[in-house]
Each structure stands twice: as structure tokens, then as C-alpha cells.
Image (cartoon, helix red, strand yellow):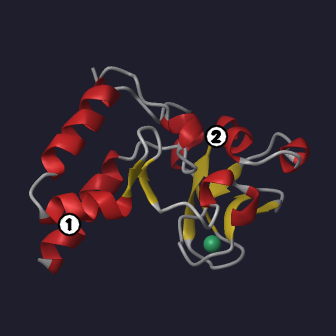
Amino acid sequence: MMKNCCSKQNCSATKGCPQCGKISKSVELQTVVHQVKFPDVLSIVEDDYYFCDEQSCALVYFSASNKQIYKQQISVFDSARAAKLCYCFDVDKEVYIQALANNSAAEIKQFVVQKTQASLCACEIKNPSGRCCLADFKKLEAISRVKF
Ligand SMILES: [Zn+2]
């Protein structure tokens, strides 16, 4: 059975990002407290949080009571790190794009799908969106089909 990465009731809630205006999906407090670096994490209180996935936006999370959390407060957005596709198994976006070009992408995706089905992924904690990355695999595949 596929693991349900999104079981909470208010999961489909959205709100416009106060910085860039992009419609942002809700994210669990569990995700936020595991993503924000110490000591900033000390100031995270219970609230409804949203995740802005706009790459050029300075924000990563904001809350219903307008607490704003910036990318530099989240370890996975350190500038030295490559953009990740899958945070659970450390797959870079560039690596998957290359694999799509070389026809070796199926093996990578199959690994992630299998591990997800076996409930061995940790999207809620490792992925800053708090969501399963498989939708992002599909997005990159669609982009690559346009490119090649
Ligand atoms: Zn934003």
C-alpha cells in the first residue's frame, strides 16, 4: 500500500506568500520544527504554517499569524548544496535531469517508488515541503520531454 504522506485534515489549505504572492500549501508543524536550524527553531510556536515553493523567493515558510521563516534559516537551502529532487534519498535535480537524458532515470525512480511503498521514506521530516517528492519527479520528466 502506498504510504499516505498527507493524512491531516487541513492538508489542502493554501495561502498566498506574503513576499512573492505565490499560492502556498500548508505544511505540518512537524516538518517546520525539523527543518528550521537551531537556535531559530526555539521561536517556532504552534501555528498554521505554509510552504512557499517559489525558488526565487526569500521565504520558505510563513504562518497564519504572519511569522516568516527565510531560506537561510533552513539547512537544506544552504547555498553550497545542490537543489534536491528527493530529500529522503539525497537525489539532486541535476542528477535526475542527466539520468533522463541518458535513459537511466527509471532505476532511480523505481528505487524511490519502492522505498516509498515500503514506508521507508521520511518526506514529512526531510522534505521542506513536508510532501512526497514523487510529484516532483513527474514535473521534471514533463520538463525534460519538452527540452529533448
Ligand atoms: Zn514566496
Quarter of the figure with the N terminus:
top left
Q: Local crowd at mark 1 within 10 Å, few (<14), some, or many (≥20)?
A: few
Q: Which mark is residue 142?
A: 1
Q: Residue at x 90, y 47 (%)?
A: 43
Which percent across, then down, holds residue 87? 47, 45
Spatial CA span between label 1 and label 2? 28 Å
Secondary structure state at the residue bearing disc 2: helix
Q: Earlier in the sequence, mark 1 or mark 2?
A: 2
Q: How many marks?
A: 2
**Residue 40 visible in the shown view:** yes
Pick whichever, 135 or 79, lies toward us.
Answer: 79
Secondary structure state at the residue bearing disc 1: helix
Quarter of the figure with the C terminus:
bottom left
Q: Residue at x 83, y 59 (%)?
A: 67
Which percent across, then down, holds residue 98? 23, 64
- Which residue, as the protein is rendered here, is positioned at the far front? 80
Pick whichever, 142 or 97, lies toward us.
Answer: 97
28 horizontally vs 12: left or right: right
Q: Which mark is residue 31?
A: 2
21 horizontally vs 40: left or right: left
Q: Amino acid at mark 2?
A: Thr
Q: Residue at x 59, y 36 (%)?
A: 125
Which percent across, then down, holds residue 119? 38, 22
Q: Local crowd at mark 2 within 10 Å, few (<14), some, or many (≥20)?
A: some
Snapshot quadrant of residue 73: bottom right
